[in-house]
Amino acid sequence: MIKNQSVNAWIEEMKALVKPDNVVVIDGSEAQYEALRAEACSTGEMIKLNEETLPGCYLHRTAVNDVARVEDRTFICAKTKEAAGPTNNWMEPQEAYKMLYDIAKDSYKGRTMYVIPYSMGPVGSEFSKIGIELTDSIYVVLNMAIMTRVGADVLDALGDSEDWIRGLHCRCEIDESKRYICHFPEDNTIISVNSGYGGNVLLGKKCFALRIASFLGKNEGWMAEHMLILGLENPKGEVKYIAAAFPSACGKTNLAMLIPPEKYRKQGYKVWCVGDDIAWMRVGEDGRLWAINPENGFFGVAPGTNEKSNPNALASTRKNTIFTNVAHDLDTNEVWWEGLNDNPPTNALNWRGEEWDYKKYDKADKVGTSGAHPNSRFTAPAENCPCISSEFNSGKGVPISAIVFGGRRAKAAPLVYQSRDWDHGVFVGAVMASETTAAATGKVGVVRHDPMAMRPFCGYHMAEYFQHWLDMGDKLGDKAPKIFNVNWFRLDDDGNFIWPGFGDNMRVLNWILDRCENKVDAKETAIGYVPNAGDIDIEGLDDVNADTLAELLNVDKDVWTAEAKDIEEFFASTFGDKLPAELADSLNTLKEKLN
Ligand code: OXD
Ligand code: MN
């Protein structure tokens, strides 16, 4: 079936290394997927869920030691350590290949090699790029089939081109001590061994669409970003698009599928989801920035997803979805997770597959006592989403009016502010910091610097990445999107969230778009433009009055003086004199304005 010689040559090379019993090329047909689902169920790799209430849905459990991305075992194997930069682990490429090939050697014996031809982006679009993933996991095949565009038409679109990304995944023994997720940006190659967790093994996602693609983007003059894309439709039927970067598990999926508060809905406002995790953006013929979502599905965090927080995400998971590491209700053969509803199943297995007593749930030990793992996931087709954008499959993309950065910050960042210009906006993105979450292994809740939410995903030196952002601003000139920062997670002195978040975030998005169209004024502060109190609509919010709004918008001089010091230390210790001058200038301006 495969005619492309470079693809065939590489498959032969990898076959000789991993020695599969047989090779199956994934053609994208429903018949082939159905056979694979049946096989996975017969071996226990997947469990078929209730066909009446969850048609086409399956449950999978990963190994207990393999439930999140492993940043400490993720490497950028560029030729030099300098090219990988200070925010990435680095391994010398030849050394890395040798180590990985030693681990991968013979690892498919007794197993099948699945060859997955996939396109990131609509097949044939000028934005899109093609990858071939080899895997010994049916779970990976079926997830890739949801998350990307897979099949024979991808091979047709590739033709005899050598421009494609190699991805080798070997489950091996799921041995933590030999788990490596390695990227060879100069060779367009990804190798992942000893894991079965999505973020480590669905190689189209973080590995290709962010780490490798960010490197390609720098060289080819476009951007690969950890951003959702949404379209906000006003009562006149005009749709404006926003791209927003938040660290993992900080609500990108919720924002991307937001349902406007009732009063806005009645006026005719709507939100359309283009993507919830990744944006590829290019300067279009008209000089504006255009974006596509290269993915074809959602790999969303299950806990906390419910009828109120994100009805669209929940609806997306009601058919043809794969659930990973959630609780299994044995009475109904359905799934459950913390925050789904107040009725935990009484006859259930937890994410580890053990009998589970919901009464023993202890918030302080979620991993040990919860039904679902805190980083349990749903893999749902984008076409299931009730608010999927009509432009979702458009190869042309959508024009971006505003770029929004945000994180989990208890105090420093106000609800929203706007940068003074593009270069200052790059600074605003570069100084993003957020509390860590369960999406990656390691301690949860520690504030860390996460520039543009790309710290775990930038495939090259991050100071050069900042420079690339500045260069894109030069290309875009006065057509550049405006840049903002939001913080939905501000706490009061008792530790309660002050802003209601979820659908009400629409009130902030409206201000952002009004600013893009010069419809409202703003107050200049040391950190940028903050809304005038009357310009954020709080009508109908029970818990937010003028005083709370003032607190939410407050830019505290002492807090920001400490923040500026912290930024200075972060810049100096991480980037030294590689930091672009524009960012050092923005920091100096901030310090001057605070004085
Ligand atoms: C994700 C992540 O899965 O950021 O999107 O971890
Ligand atoms: Mn993500």
Image (cartoon, rainbow, N blue to C red):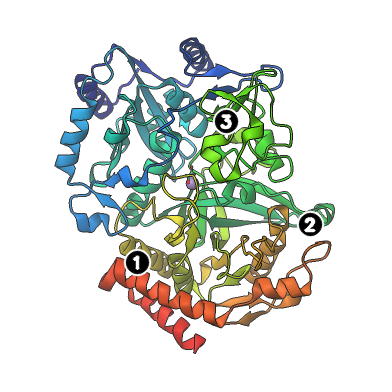
Q: Nearer the viewer, residue 149 or 378?
A: 378
Please indicate whether residue 91 sits to the left or right of residue 484 in the image. left
Query: What element does badge 3 sit on?
Result: loop
> How far apart, in angstroms, are the residues tagged by discs 1 and 3?
41 Å
Residue 350 placed where, x, y %?
57, 27
Question: Few, some or many C-alpha atoms within 10 Å of disc 3 (few <14, some 14-19, many ≥20)?
Answer: many
Please name the residue that numbered disc 3 is placed on: 326
Please indicate whether residue 525 sits to the left or right of residue 90 in the image. right
Residue 7 placed where, x, y %?
28, 27
**Can residue 297 be seen from the camera position used here?**
no
Q: How many marks?
A: 3
Q: Amino acid at mark 2?
A: Pro
Query: What element does badge 2 sit on?
Result: loop
Are the residues at dot 1 and dot 3 in contact (C-beta closer than 8 Å)? no
Above or below: residue 219 compared with residue 481: above
Question: In the picture, residue 167 is in which quadrant?
Answer: top left
Q: Amino acid at mark 1?
A: Gln
